[in-house]
């Protein structure tokens, strides 16, 4: 499992570059163009990221997460769910920037390589900003009803979160 | 939506600080949070830009097109209502590919095109048909090859191996995707507008 992890990044990068070269693409130019685009999109999310990081830092300093965790820890312990990642689970379906702010707060508190930090990373990586996506896509064609979209999407998110907890618990 | 979320966050912070007597910490955190945000954006920039660059090569060399084509047969089965709507299916598969490669900028416009194309052939006025629901569920449970934002955040937080969670992320994402797809199929099954709508 760990070996796959070590090889993945270099293999993907080299594969994509070689594939591009084989197709006669100017890979370096393409790379630079992408970097520019990446910088642009980082700058465009920076204000909302900043707002939410300030918000989440304040929320964390105010002791809200402790209150929340204390209140829900009996329920969490009963089902074996790490309570510390609960704020992430609540934030994730609503806002991307907000969940990244919470993730960063979790890393500051427990460490990125701790069990909690790793669980939170996998959780954030395997789920999406469900409500945001629903709002954007249905909004774009003027649909008000969503039928079974929300239950199905939330079930997917919950499955991702539970799988994240189990993966880190069993494989380290 | 963020408008409400942000307001709630700030009000909750104030209330919790008042209850737990941490007003001093709260007042310091407004400044330290802003400071942290700037540092974080700067330290994330490298990783984010790097992956954006690599994935741009994939896009330029039309690796995305090959992946889209490979996905076509699967997607047709998932949304049979639109299987003969070539423009919708092309946009759907291009959107899913963009999501897998983490091309966020490309994914959303493609997704909107897909929705518009599907809407044209849908007999329902104010509700999505099963294919549209399936498409949105696929998007909300999307599998990403390199979760670059998370890797960037881990890197910024001093992780020794920011990418060592990759295999778990894939496993959990695929399971989430399967759960979403199965749920969407099962929940659409007995409703009146579940029948194939074409021609």
Image (spheres, coloured by chain):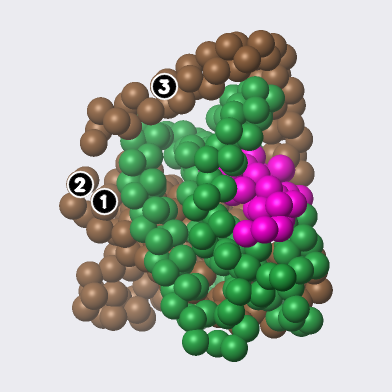
Chain colours: A brown, B green
Please give left or right for residue B138 compared with residue A111 in the image.
right
Looking at the rendered structure, the secondary structure element under dot 2 is helix
Foreground tag (1 vs 3) = 3
Q: Residue furthest left?
A: A170
Asked if badges 1 and 3 are on one and the same chain, I answer yes
Residue that numbered label 3 is attached to: A11
Label 2 lies in what chain? A
Q: Quadrant of residue A43?
A: top right
Find disc 1 in the rendering and name its residue.
A168
Distance CA(mark 1)–CA(mark 2): 5 Å
Foreground residue, A83 or B55? B55
Residue B123 lies, with reference to residue B121, above or below; the image says below
Q: Please say if the residues under marks 1 and 2 sit with CB atoms less than 8 Å apart.
A: yes
- In reply to whether residue B100 is colored magenta, the answer given is yes
Q: Is residue B129 above or below residue B44?
A: below
Q: Is residue A125 left or right of residue B93?
A: left
Q: Are marks 2 and 3 on the same chain?
A: yes
């Amino acid at each position: 499992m760990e070996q796959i992890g070590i090889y993945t990044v270099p293999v993907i990068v080299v594969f994509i570059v070689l594939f591009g070269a084989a197709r006669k693409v100017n890979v370096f130019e393409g790379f630079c163009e992408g970097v520019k685009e990446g910088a642009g999109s980082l700058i465009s999310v920076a204000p909302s990221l900043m707002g939410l990081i300030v918000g989440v830092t304040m929320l964390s300093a105010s002791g809200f997460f402790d209150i929340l965790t204390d209140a829900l820890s009996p329920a969490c312990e009963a089902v074996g769910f790490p309570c510390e990642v609960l704020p992430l689970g609540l934030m994730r379906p609503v806002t991307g920037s907000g969940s990244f702010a919470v993730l960063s707060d979790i890393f500051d508190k427990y460490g990125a390589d701790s069990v909690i930090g790793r669980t939170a990373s996998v959780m954030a990586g395997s789920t999406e900003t469900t409500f945001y996506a629903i709002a954007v896509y249905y909004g774009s064609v003027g649909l008000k009803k969503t039928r079974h979209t929300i239950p199905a999407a939330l079930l997917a998110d919950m499955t991702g979160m539970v799988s994240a907890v189990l993966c880190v618990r069993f494989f380290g | 939506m963020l408008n409400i979320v942000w307001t709630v966050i700030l009000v909750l912070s104030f209330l919790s600080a008042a209850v737990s007597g941490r007003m001093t910490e709260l007042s310091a955190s407004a400044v330290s949070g802003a400071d942290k945000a700037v540092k974080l954006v700067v330290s994330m920039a490298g990783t984010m830009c790097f992956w954006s660059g690599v994935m741009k090569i994939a896009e330029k060399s039309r690796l995305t097109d090959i992946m889209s084509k490979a996905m076509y047969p699967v997607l047709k089965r998932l949304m049979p209502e639109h299987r003969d709507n070539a423009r919708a299916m092309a946009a759907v598969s291009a959107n899913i590919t963009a999501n897998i490669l983490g091309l966020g900028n490309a994914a959303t416009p493609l997704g909107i095109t897909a929705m518009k194309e599907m809407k044209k052939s849908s007999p329902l006025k104010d509700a999505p048909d099963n294919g549209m629901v399936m498409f949105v569920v696929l998007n909300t449970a999307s599998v990403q090859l390199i979760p670059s934002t998370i890797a960037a955040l881990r890197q910024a937080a001093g992780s020794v191996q920011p990418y060592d969670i990759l295999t778990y992320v894939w496993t959990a994402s695929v399971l989430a995707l399967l759960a979403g797809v199965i749920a969407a199929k099962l929940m659409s099954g007995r409703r009146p507008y579940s029948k194939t709508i074409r021609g």
